[in-house]
Image (spheres, grey):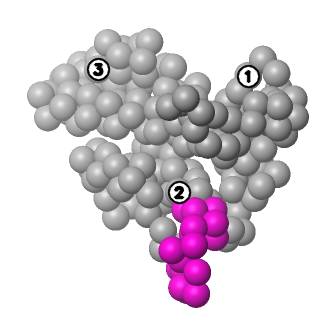
Amino acid sequence: MDHERLRQKLAPESVMITLVRAGSFLSAYELIKSEIVEKVHGFFWNGFQDGHHTYDEARYQQSVLVRNPKNRYAASCDWLVEMGALTAEQVTTLGAIQKHRHEIAHELPKLVIDPDFEVRTDLLLAAAEVVRRLGVFWGSIEADTNPDFDGTEVDYDGIKSGSYLLMEYLVTIAGLAGQEQPTSEAEPV
């Protein structure tokens, strides 16, 4: 092993950047999971009963879960592709994001000391783009169904969800602000 590369990897500034990027990546993954699994289920919300949220579980099952009964995440991704919120390419990238998330979470000491193991910043930027795209999708549904927006012209691509604002912050503290994020091929909703 090259001792100089190891020395550089273990420098306090390097370790700090690595840990910030790892935390940003792990947080990004949790944001994505929420935007996909929880919000797709929430799409089938139909009100309150006895102080609890109620959902049209039969419709959710028929529209989403039937696609992959053993994996709500995969089923929800497939539904989002059909709805035009994500592209099949983005779902493939989400698979790489999930795999890298597991590497980071389970190999954190290796991430800190192995000069050949780094947080994949390309995937962190791709995660930010997916969160942006999903925020536009869910925000457009809100704008289109909320009577408060009747007669108002909405700039759908300008929608920034709370999750995306947090993602922007994570990208900034990871030292990636201003770097080009992968563009989405999904059509505006």
Identify the residue under disc 2. Answer: 135
Q: Residues within 10 Å of mark 3 (few under 14, many from 20)?
A: many
Under circle 1, the secondary element is: loop
Identify the residue under disc 1. Answer: 71
Quarter location, residue 15: top left
Identify the residue under disc 3. Answer: 112
Nearer the observer, 87 or 143? 143
Left or right position of 93 against 10: right
Q: Are marks 3 and 1 in contact (CB under 8 Å)?
A: no
| Mark 3 vs mark 2, CA separation in Å | 32 Å
Q: Nearer the viewer, mark 3 or mark 2?
A: 2
Q: Quadrant of the N terminus?
A: top left
Where residue 173 appears, x then y in whole percent?
24, 47
Q: Quadrant of the C terminus?
A: bottom right
Q: Residues within 10 Å of mark 2 (few under 14, many from 20)?
A: many
Instruction: State the residue at coordinates (67%, 43%).
Output: 46
The magenta segment: 139-155
Tell me the amino acid under the disc marked 1: Asn
Nearer the observer, 25 or 64? 64
Tell me the amino acid under the disc marked 2: Gly
| Mark 1 vs mark 2, CA separation in Å | 22 Å
Tell me if residue 153 is in the magenta stretch. yes
Left or right position of 177 against 149: left
Left or right position of 111 against 47: left
Q: Earlier in the sequence, mark 3 or mark 1?
A: 1
Under circle 3, the secondary element is: helix
Tell me if residue 58 is in the magenta stretch. no
Q: Earlier in the sequence, mark 3 or mark 2?
A: 3
Where residue 104 appears, x then y in whole percent?
43, 22
